[in-house]
Image (cartoon, helix red, strand yellow):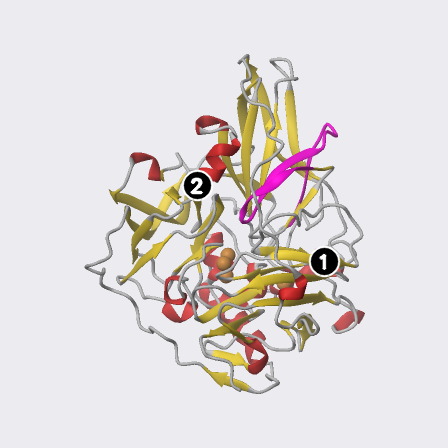
Amino acid sequence: MINRRQFLTITGAGASALVTGGITSLVEAAGAGATTKSTANFNPDLDIALKATSAEIPILPGNPTSVWSYRAQLLKGGPASLMHLERSYLGPIIRAHTGQKVRIRFSNDVADETIVHWHGLHVPADMDGHPRFVIPQGESYIYEFEVRNRAGTYWYHPHPHGLTGPQVYGGLAGLFLVADDEEKAAGLPTGKYDIPLVIQDRAFDNRNQLIYLSGHHMQQMTGFLGDWILVNGQPDFSLAVATRAYRLRLLNGSNSRIYKLAWQDGHPLTIVGTDGGLLEKPVQRRYVMLGPGERLEVWADFSQYPVGSELTLASLPFDAGAMGGGRMGRGMMGSGTVLPNGAGFSILRVKVNRQEKETHTLPHRLSTISRYRHRDAVNREYPRRFHLVMRHMAWTINGRTFRMREVANDEKVRLNTLEVWEFINEGGAMGMMGGMDMPHPMHLHGMQFQVLERRGVKHEGYVDEGWKDTVLLMPGERIRLLVRFGDYPGLFLYHCHNLEHEDMGMMRNYLIENKVASV
Ligand code: C2O
Ligand code: CU
Ligand code: CU
C-alpha cells in the first residue's frame, strides 16, 4: 500500500540537513514508557477496545482497496457511544459527554509503529499520543482520561514521527464527538439530522490500490494531493435529505489539501461551530477556507428547496501559492497530480428527496464563550513568535525541525498562564527558485485557543470567532492567538497539520512547566 522505505528516505534527508539553532534541552518525559495496564481505581463510563488493523474495503467499483483502519469494540457504555460507519475505512465515531471518564485500550495490529492522538482534546501529556509513546505491532497502550472539552467535533489519528502522513492516508482516522448540556440547550438538529462528513483526497492505481508519495522530494515539500475526493471514505458522495434543517459536521481529514467550501448555488454558509465546538451565535460566510485538521459545523436548511432539487457543496478555485500547483508547472511537482491544491471541484451532492415538516429554527444564541483578554497574557508585550520558513529544502518553525525530546528555552511556558502566540507565514524569499509560498495549517496539542488578530489576510474565508486548535495561514498571513496552558504540565506538540510537512519535521515540542516563579 505504502512504500515505507522510500518514504523514510525522503524524511531522513529532510531532517538531517538541518542545523538546529538556539539553546535547547532534552526533556525527560514525565510518565514515560507505554501505559500497558489499566488503573484499578479509574472507573470509566466508557471503555473501548480500539485496534489499528489492516483491511480490504471496497471504495471504487471493482477491486477492493487495502487499507489500514481503526476497528473498535464497546466494552462499557451506552450503545450510542460507538458508531461504525458502513463500508468505510474510517474508524468508528466515538461519542462521549463532557465529564465522562473514558478508557481506550488501544492495540497495534499493523506492521509499523504507531500511537493514537486525540486531536483537540484537552488531556494529560501521557494521554495525548506524543510520538515518543509509539508502540510496535502486537503491543498496546491504555488511555484513561476525563473528557474536559466542551461539546464539539474532535477526531483521532496516528502520530508516530515521520509516519503520520502515510498512516492517516492509509485509512487511520476517526471522529470523537463530545456532547454537553449547553449544546443540548442550543436545540440543534440531532440524531440522523446531525451528519458527520469527513473530507479526504486519495489517489488510486489501476488496481484500485492507494498511491502515496511518488518519492519525489518536491511532493514532500508540497504535501500529498489525490485526485479523488472522498467523503466518509466514499467517492461521489451524495446525501439524501428531507426539507428541513441539518447540522453538518465537516472535518478536513486530508493530508495537505485545503478546501474553499461553498454552496454552489451562491447561498452563504451558515456556520454554527468550529474546532472547539459551538460559536456564540451563527455567522455567515460566502465561503470558508478549511485547512487539514480543521472542523466546521454548518447549519443547512433545506426547507426552502422543493423535493427533487439538488445542491452541491463545492470547493471553489483559489490561489494556493507557488508550491501549491498554481504557478509552478505540473512537471515540477514530479507526479501526475491532476487536481492541484486550489483547483475547483464538487465535494458532495445533496439530494432533497422527501417532504418533512420543519421543527427547528436557527438559534440566535448557541453557547457562551468566555473571552480571554489580551491584557491578561503574561507576555502581552512580547508575543512568542514562530516563523514558518523553509531552510535547506525543508519546512521549519523558527529554523528548527522536530527532535523527539528536544525543547528550546523559548518553547517553555508556565502552567496555568495565558500567552500570546504569533505564527508568521512569511512566504517567498527563503527558498530555491526564488520563493516557495505555501499555506500552513498550524495546530497546538492539548489546548483550544482563541484568535486575537490576523494580518495580511486577503480573503473572507476564516471563522475565527470560536474556539480553535488549528488555524490556516495562507502565504503572507500572520496570526496572534491567546492560549491558556491549563491543568496539565508536560511535553506537548505544536506543528503544521500538512501531514507531509509534519512528517518532515515541521513540528516542535513545547513544555508546560509546573514551577513557582523564581524571585
Ligand atoms: Cu491532528 Cu498533532 O495532530
Ligand atoms: Cu492534535
Ligand atoms: Cu506546513
Crowding at mark 2 (Cα within 10 Å: few <14, some 14-19, many 20+) = some
**Numbered badge on residue 158:** none
Identify the residue under disc 1.
453
For the N terminus, the quadrant is bottom left
**Residue 515 occupies which quadrant of the picture?**
bottom left
In the image, residue 22 lies in the stretch drawn in magenta: no
Whether ligand 2 has any atom under 8 Å from the Cβ at mark 2 is answered as no
Q: Which residue is mark 2?
A: 180
Q: Position of residue 299 (x, y in %)?
A: 60, 31
Q: Nearer the viewer, residue 1 or 48?
A: 48
SS at mark 2 in the image:
loop
Q: Position of residue 117 (x, y in %)?
A: 43, 58
Amino acid type at circle 1 is Glu
Q: Is residue 273 magenta?
A: yes
Frontmost residue, 43 versus 375 = 375
Instruction: Identify the image quadrant of residue 395.
Output: bottom right
Q: Which residues are magenta?
A: 258-283
Q: Is residue 408 above or below residue 308?
A: below
Counting from the top left corner in percent of width and height, residue 51 is at: 31, 52
Does the rendering let one see residue 455? yes
> Residue lying farthest left?
40
Image location (x, y in percent) of residue 261: 67, 40
For residue 10, side relative to residue 490 (left or right): right
Disc 1 Cβ-to-ligand 3 distance below 8 Å: no
Mark pair 1, 2: CA separation? 29 Å
At a point 26% along the width and 63% down the height, the residue shown is 139
- Callout 1: helix, strand or loop? strand
